[in-house]
Structure formats: structure tokens, C-alpha cells
Image (spheres, grey):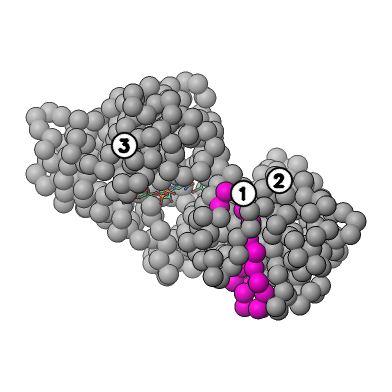
Amino acid sequence: MNVNVVGSGYVGTTLAACLAEMGHEITAIDIDESVVATINEGRAPLHEPGLDELLAEHVGTRLQATTSYADLADADLTFLAIGTPSRSDGSIDLGPLSAAAEMVGEALSGLGGDREHLVVVKSTITPPGLDRVREALATGLGDVAGAVEFATNPEFLREGTAVSDFRNPDKIVFGTESASALATLEELYAPLIESTDSPIVRTDPETAMLIKYANNAFLATKISLANDLGNVSKEFGLDAYEVMEAVGLDDRIGEQFLRSGVGWGGSCFPKDVNALIFSAREVGYEPPLLEAAVEVNDRQPERLLALLDEHVDVAGERVAVLGLAFKPGTDDVRNSRAIPLIEGLLERGATVVGYDPVATETMREVFSDTEIEYADSAEDALAGASGAVVATDWDEFAALDSEFDAMAEPVVVDGRRIIERREGITYEGLTW
Ligand SMILES: NC(=O)C1=CN([C@@H]2O[C@H](COP(=O)(O)OP(=O)(O)OC[C@H]3O[C@@H](n4cnc5c(N)ncnc54)[C@H](O)[C@@H]3O)[C@@H](O)[C@H]2O)C=CC1
Ligand SMILES: O=C(O)[C@H]1O[C@H](OP(=O)(O)OP(=O)(O)OC[C@H]2O[C@@H](n3ccc(=O)[nH]c3=O)[C@H](O)[C@@H]2O)[C@H](O)[C@@H](O)[C@@H]1O
């Protein structure tokens, strides 16, 4: 099939590359010229394992990127994979997605005769917000609004494993309003459905989006519960990992997303849980459990710094922050737990030295070189430091050993249970 993917971020680029891999003809559209140029060179505009290889294989044959909406109507369907960032009140900013929907509508307004087109929202957007996107699309379409159908197809991939998650989904959710829209999506995904046996959930567009929010809210709350129980374990002098490993053996609970520590970050859990809380309040419901999940998460970085305070007064001292990305495998620092840790250290008057294998450049946009130092290796970050805090569980941190010997005061507070305890360091785990 011939497919447009509007928005070439983590989701859009992964979608475009994986659909090309499935044999479809893809046009990736982004307003950012540098993103488009990078994709057309056969490289990913962001760090995501496996994506460069897929793009190198398919760009120029089954996939090309452009900033132009001009040929949109030539395709069978158009995905919208535009960001839906948080506002300060927790609601999502529908501006970029609505603007893109209107531009798509305008580009499709030339559709004539019996041509039909399906517009599929891939972005995560609360059910009440969908009408605004429908309206924006209809405004752009004008007279031919009837020739375009509307659907949602929420995405469940994780950053850092986006390509493999897309290829092996736990479920595929289609939110459609007609049998023909559903048939189009099933035809598009047929190669994936056949190769993976993934269960298909067929529902309406709004329910599909609430499934997405409920999914993320459940996972974030699961981690917050693990953190709450982890804090209790620590106060009892017990190891939360030993406890939760046993708890996870219960099939009804499951072993995943029970790793306690400095909490959840990223572009989605914080944004989506807060958006769900905001939307629930708008219709008159206060969701106490979701609010508590956010509160527990917000407190974890300060708990970590309080542990550091017990061992060292960091005012005027160098402190290493190991890991800047919100999780390993990505250069994304959006809502990374490293950010409140760095802020707390700066408030204490520390000189912060950050290190991350891939996220230094993205963190430079949050903290400039005048605010914090960036090291080229964990070894350089640790040298001369009077304390180290661990914000991201990059594998390479597990191998650190003699590097700690160069610290001025070898106090290590681990927020991710990645550092090996060893002789010669004062080691504190956040929940163990
Ligand atoms: N990042 C993730 O792991 C996941 C994200 N999602 C959801 O998918 C959506 C997209 O997220 P990301 O890919 O992370 O966003 P992103 O911020 O990485 O990428 C969005 C892209 O859209 C482009 N863009 C903005 N306005 C445009 C326009 N009018 N026309 C064309 N391009 C335009 C931007 O230049 C940018 O490249 C969000 O709603 C997010 O919640 C869902 C599942 C996973
Ligand atoms: O909607 C989205 O964007 C995506 O959000 C999450 O994916 P992602 O944010 O990429 O990463 P996760 O692996 O879920 O990790 C999120 C945060 O939780 C933290 N985490 C995760 C697992 C755990 O046991 N403990 C824990 O603290 C991670 O360190 C990270 O900061 C979901 O897992 C995806 O299914 C979803 O599609």
C-alpha cells in the first residue's frame, strides 16, 4: 500500500521504516528540514537501535522523506505521528497535532471522484481531544470531508527498543468507525499480523485511545507501587529487589515493571498520566490512585539526594551524575530523572559532572556547559568527585570498578541498581 507518515520522531520514523520493511511504499513528512535530510541520507534523526539499518535499506526505494504535503492524496492512508506535549496544567497541547491535521486536510482537499483516504491518528491523545482533530481535519478538507475516514491506532512501543517492539507487539489496537477503515488497517498490518500472531483489538477511535492511556497509567502506577513498597523495604533495612522478584512470580502480578528506584521519566508516562488525571477532573472525577502514582514518582529523586546528604555535604564539591537519558538505549532526556537530580545538586551548591553514552547533546539543551560539566566517560566523571548518583541503568555502569578509586570521596548512591557493590566505596541503593 501507499502510505504517508506525518511526523518523523521516535514513533513516526519507526513506523515509516517498519512499514517499508513490510513491503509498503512510504512517504515520511516532517516540517523539520534537518530531520527530512537525515532520513533521506538513510540515517535515523534520533538514536534508536536497528533504525539506521532499516532506513539504510529502504530509503530511496520504498521510503522517502519530504517537507512537502503536496502529494499526500496519492496515498491510500495517512498516519499522524505528531507530538502531543504536556502543558503546565497537565493537559496536552493539541496545537501541533491539530495544525498537522488541518494541513493534511488541505492537502487531501483535491481528492476527487470515488477516491477515498483514511487518516489514522497514531499520536497519543485523550478521547475528548479527538473531536478537535476531527474538526481540524474537516476544516482543511472543506467540501470533500466525506471522502476521508478517520481512525486511531495507538502505539505501544518503548524508546530504546522501538523497532523490536513494533515488530513484536503484545497487541495491535484499531479504533475505526467503519468496516472499510478497519479493512484498510488490517490489510496494511497483514504481514505483521501473520508473522507475529499478535492479538488484534477492534474498537472505536475513543476506546482505542483510552486503552492506550490505561495501559501507560497501569505501568506507571505499577512502578510507583514498587517504589512505595521499595521505600518501605529500605526503611526496614530490607532489599526491595529480593521482595519484588518473589512478588513478580505471581502470574497475576507479573515480573515486569517492578524495578524500583529513582522513578519513571520519558516523554510518555509523565505526560500521559497527567493528561488522564486532567481529563478525568474535567468530567468531574478525581483519580486518587493516579495522583498518588505521580506523587510517589516526584519524591524519588529527593529521597535519593537525602541518602547522599547522609554521607557527604556536596556544597562546593564535584558530584558525578551517571546517566542522563530517561532510560538506557535512547538519547531522549525528556522528563529524565537526571533532571531533578541535577537541579537538587545545583541547589546544594555542588559542581555537577554529567556523563551519558549517547544523551550528552540532548541534555546540553536542558543544562548548558556553563551550568554543568559534561564528561566523555564515566571514568572522567568520577575522577575527583565527592559523590556519584546513578540516574540511568546503562549496562556499561555495571562494569565500573577501579574507576571509583579516583573519586575524592567514594560515595555512590544508585537509583537504578546497576552498580556492583565493591570494597572501597560507600554504596547506597535507593530501595535496597
Ligand atoms: N516516543 C514514544 O516512545 C512513544 C510516543 N507515542 C506518542 O506518539 C506521538 C509522537 O511522539 P514522538 O514520536 O515521541 O514525538 P517527537 O516529538 O519525537 O516527533 C514529532 C515529530 O513531528 C514533527 N512535526 C511537528 N509538527 C508537524 C507538522 N505539522 N507536520 C509534519 N511534522 C510535524 C516534528 O518536527 C517531530 O519530528 C505522541 O503523541 C506520543 O505520546 C506513543 C508511543 C510511544
Ligand atoms: O507511550 C509511550 O510512549 C510508551 O511509554 C512507555 O515506554 P517508554 O517511556 O519508552 O519506556 P519504558 O521502558 O516504559 O520506561 C519508562 C520509564 O520507567 C522507568 N522504569 C521502567 C521499568 C521499571 O521496572 N522501573 C522503572 O523505573 C524507566 O527507567 C523509564 O524512566 C511504555 O512502556 C510503552 O508501552 C509506551 O508506548
- In the picture of the structure, the residue carrying the numbered disc 2 is 396
Callout 2: 10 Å neighbours few (<14), some, many (20+)?
A: few
* The label number, if any, that marks residue 65 in the structure image: 3
Disc 3 marks a residue whose amino acid type is: Ala
Q: CA distance from mark 1 to mark 3?
A: 28 Å
Residue 220 seen anywhere in this rendered image of the structure:
no
Q: Which residue is mark 1?
A: 357
Q: Residue at x 90, y 56 (%)?
A: 423
Q: Which residues are magenta?
A: 340-359
Disc 3 element = strand
Between marks 1 and 2, how big is the CA–CA gap? 9 Å
| Residue shown at the point (25%, 54%) measured from the top left | 99
Q: Is mark 2 within 8 Å of ligand 2?
A: no
Rendered view: 417 above or below 344: above
Element class at badge 1:
loop
Three-letter amino acid code at the position of disc 1: Pro
Residue 125 is covered by the magenta coloring = no
> Residue 210, can we see it?
yes
